[in-house]
């Protein structure tokens, strides 16, 4: 990718990371309304998701700083990571909303 195309890609990836961070914050607020037993079940999952989002952020930052000539491997890795985060967040969110925390 040339530099302008790379920057567009980085911006798109950063927007996705930001969206995940906002979802996690919303999940924490919902978890805060739960009793301690349920909260203890969901908080480790939220913590794990935060680690995955942080890892994705680090990869995006690396892409932005290094601007490799071949982005494909890192983009594929990020796509996989975002897919994993997405399914984990969706599953956790369903559990939160359904009250089946850790069910």
Image: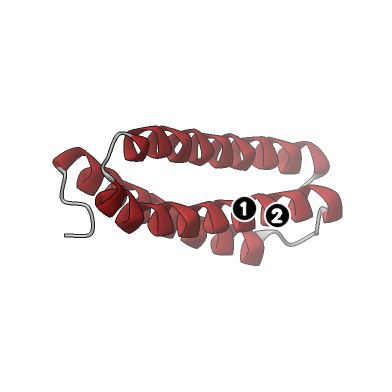
Q: Residues within 10 Å of mark 2 (few under 14, many from 20)?
A: few
SS at badge 1: helix
Q: Is residue 83 visible?
A: no
Q: Residue at x 67, y 35 (%)?
A: 11
Residue 98: x, y in percent? 15, 42
SS at badge 2: helix
Q: Is residue 103 visible?
A: yes
Residue 63: x, y in percent? 75, 53
Q: Residue at x 16, y 60 (%)?
A: 103
Q: Residues within 10 Å of mark 1 (few under 14, many from 20)?
A: some
Residue situated in front as seen by the camera: 101 or 17: 101
The residue singled out by tag 2 in the image is: 58
Which numbered disc covers residue 54? 1
Q: Are marks 1 and 2 in contact (CB under 8 Å)?
A: yes
Residue situated in front as seen by the camera: 17 or 23: 23
How far apart, in angstroms, are the residues tagged by discs 1 and 2?
A: 6 Å
Left or right: 88 with respect to 101?
right
Colour treatment of the image: secondary structure
Select label 1 or label 2 by which is in front.
1
Residue situated in front as seen by the camera: 31 or 15: 31
Q: Residue at x 75, y 49 (%)?
A: 61
Determine which quarter of the picture holds residue 83.
bottom left
Left or right: 32 with respect to 76?
left
Which numbered disc covers residue 2? none
Residue 66: x, y in percent? 84, 56
Residue 68: x, y in percent? 80, 59
Left or right: 21 with respect to 10?
left
Determine which quarter of the picture holds residue 88.
bottom left
Q: Residue furthest right?
A: 66
Please give the count of numbered marks on the rendered protein: 2
Q: Residue at x 24, y 43 (%)?
A: 96
């Amino acid at each position: 990718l040339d530099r302008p195309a790379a920057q567009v890609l980085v911006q798109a990836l950063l927007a996705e990371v930001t969206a995940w961070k906002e979802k996690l914050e919303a999940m924490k607020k919902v978890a805060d309304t739960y009793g301690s037993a349920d909260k203890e079940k969901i908080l480790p999952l939220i913590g794990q998701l935060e680690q995955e989002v942080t890892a994705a952020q680090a990869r995006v930052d690396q892409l932005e700083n290094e601007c490799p000539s071949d982005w494909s491997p890192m983009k594929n890795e990020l796509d996989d990571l975002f897919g994993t985060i997405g399914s984990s967040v969706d599953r956790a969110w369903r559990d939160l909303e359904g009250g089946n925390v850790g069910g």
